[in-house]
Amino acid sequence: MKIGRIIRQSPDGPVPRLVSVHPDTNTVLDLAAAERRRLIERGASHRMATRLATAQFPGSLTEALETGTAFTDAVTRLHQQCDLLDGIALTDVNWLPPVDPPVLRDFNAFKNHEVNAPDVWFEVPLFFKINPSTVIGTGGLVTWPVGCEHLDYELELGLVVGTHSSNLTPETAHRALFGVTVFNDFSARNLLRYEMDGRLGPAKGKDFCTAIGPWVVTLDELDLSDLAMSATINGEQWSAGNSGSLVWSIGEILAYASRSEPLVPGEVIGTGTVAGGSGWELGRRLAPGDVVQLDINGIGSLVNTVGDPEPARWNPQPRDRSSAR
Amino acid sequence: MKIGRIIRQSPDGPVPRLVSVHPDTNTVLDLAAAERRRLIERGASHRMATRLATAQFPGSLTEALETGTAFTDAVTRLHQQCDLLDGIALTDVNWLPPVDPPVLRDFNAFKNHEVNAPDVWFEVPLFFKINPSTVIGTGGLVTWPVGCEHLDYELELGLVVGTHSSNLTPETAHRALFGVTVFNDFSARNLLRYEMDGRLGPAKGKDFCTAIGPWVVTLDELDLSDLAMSATINGEQWSAGNSGSLVWSIGEILAYASRSEPLVPGEVIGTGTVAGGSGWELGRRLAPGDVVQLDINGIGSLVNTVGDPEPARWNPQPRDRSSAR
C-alpha cells in the first residue's frame, strides 16, 4: 500500500486529500471520493456518504492513522470493492508531504565518515528534533534561510509511525511503524556548526525545511535491510548508499525514541544520513535553482528545487558577557 | 481574558473543553456550552447551535486560535451576552494543559549564573526544541524518565503564539502573541549533560515532560516587564525571580524564532530559566512524590507532583567506534 496526499480544488479553495498510489496504472485514487461512491452504491444518502467518507479519509494522514487499524482496513476494502481505474493521472497531481507530522526527529544511525564524532554517538542512538511546521513534499520549494552560506541535502530513510506506543524494545518496535518514505534533511552547514557549539542542538541550521515523500510505502512491500539510495543534483548523481549500512537498527531507533516519551501516529523519524549522502562529505554545495532528487528503491523519487536566499529583516545584537550573567 | 482547558465527562467518554477563567467568582465558563445556550436563545435549533458552538470553541486552543480574531471576538461577545454565574466552580475542575502546542521551543533569554556558557549564548538568542507530545497541565503527574538520577524543575515564562507569522522584527513581534502562561521545563540533569556532549541538543533529558498552565492570560492584563516569579517545593520556596531580568527581550525571542520558519497558532515558547530558578543552581534535587509549584504574579499557580522512576525495559549496547565509521 502506497499512501500520499495531494491538493485538489474545491468551492472552498484548495483542499488536501489522501490518495492511494498505483504506479502500475500511473494513477492515484482519491480515497474519500472513492469511499463516498462506494457508500452511495450501497444505499447511503449523498450527505451521509460524504460525512462518513471524509471522517474515515480526512486530509491529514496523521488523523487517519489516529483511527487505528480502521484506516488500513478501509483502504483494503476500498481497493477490493471499487474500480481503481477511477483514479487521477499521476501527471495531473500536485503533491503535499504525505504526512503532516506532529513530531519530527532525526537520528544518526548510519555508518559515516565523521572522524571527530563525539563518543556519545557510539553509546546511544542519538537524535535531534526538527520543526514539523516546515515540512514540504515532492515538488515543494526549499527555503534558503537567512544567513545560510552553505545549503546542503541529506539522503535519509524516513520512518512513519502508525501507533501510539511507549517504552518499546527493538524486538517489538516494528509494530509501531506504519511505513517508510524518502527523507531529505536540508541543512544550512554554517548555521548548524555555529549552533552546535552552543550545545543546544540544531535550530536555524535545520528548522527551515525538511522534505518527505513522494508517498509512504507500508512495510509489507519492502525489505528495509536492502534499499538502494541515491541523490541526484541537476541530473548528476552525487551520492549513493544502501539502507543496509545502519549501525543502529530500525528497532533500536524506535525503542530509544519511545523511551519515557510516546511515539505518536503520523510522527516521522529520519534515520540520519547514509555515508556519503550529503554535499558536505563531498566538498560540494547546493545553489539557488538546483534540482535535488533523492531516490530510494521501492519507494520513489523526492524532487525539490532550491529557492533564493531570504534577506535578513533584523539581526540580533550580541550581549556583553559580563552584564548578561 | 484567561483561557484554559478542562476535562468533562460525556456519553462519549472524557472530552476536552475550552473555558474562560474568572478568579473573581471562582468559576470557569465552558465556552462551547455557553455559546450553545446563547445561540438557542436567539432562535438556533439545538443541533445547529451545537455544531456552530463546537466549531467556534473546539477542545483544542490551537484550533480555536487558527480561527484568527474570530476566537477572541467570540469570547468577548459571550462574556457580554451570557450569565457568567452559569460557570463551573474552580474546585470542581480537572485541568488540561491550556494549549496543545504543535511546536514547543525553549530559549535561554534570562540572566543566569552559568559561568561556562558558550560564547554563542551571548551572540544570538539560542533555543532548543522539546517534544510537544508530553505536555501536561496543572495537576498532571511528572514522568521520571528511564536513567534519570537528577530530576529538576525550571521556572520560566511561557509565550503562546496566536498568529501565523514569519521573519518578524522585535518591534512588531508582539502582535504574534496571544498570551502567556507558566512554564516548567522539567529536566533530567544527568541525561541532559550527557546528551549535550553529543552536540545534537537536549533529547531524553527534556522530552519526557513539560508542564504549562494553569491557563493562558492575554497580554492586555499584564505588564510583562515586571512579573514576580517563584518556585515552591513541598511548601518551601526554593526560587524567586522577575520577568524583568531578560537579557533577550520577548520581541527579540519572537523575531529570532520566526526567522526563516513560521510561528504557528498554539505554539508555545519558553523564555528559559530565570536566574536561580532551578534546583541545579541551588545544589538541590527533586524526589518522587515532591509537589512542585511555580507561581507567576498575574497568571497563577502551576502545580505538579513528581512520579516514580520508570524502569528500563531495554538498554542500547554501545557500538565499536572503528567498525561504526
Image (cartoon, coloured by chain):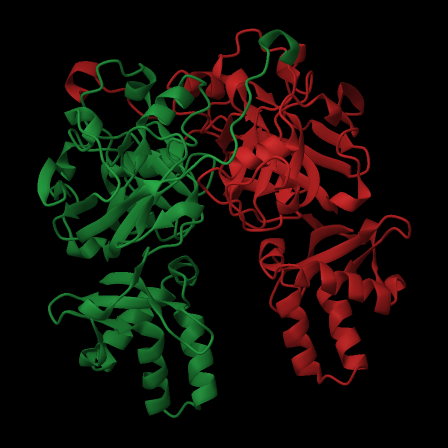
Chain colours: A green, B red
Q: Residue at x 34, y 78 (%)?
A: A33
Q: Residue at x 15, y 47 (%)?
A: A295
Is B284 above or below relative to B214?
above
Q: Position of residue B128 (x, y in %)?
A: 49, 29
Quadrant in the rendering for residue B18: bottom right
Q: Is residue A137 above or below residue A271?
A: below
> Which residue lies at the image location 82% right of the left edge and 37% below the top edge?
B298
Horizontal and vertical percent position of residue B306: 64, 30
Percent coordinates x, y for residue B284 in the rendering: 66, 13
Q: Quadrant of the C terminus of chain B?
A: top left
Snapshot quadrant of residue A66? bottom left
In the figure, is residue B288 to the left or right of A123? right
Residue A18 point in image, percent of width and height: 34, 66
Q: Is residue A206 visible?
A: yes
Q: Is residue B209 visible?
A: no
Instruction: Please tell me whether residue A1 is drawn above or below residue B105 in the rendered image.
Output: below
In this view, the residue in front, B141 or A28, is: A28
Question: Across the whole image, how many numbered discs are drawn on residues?
Answer: 0
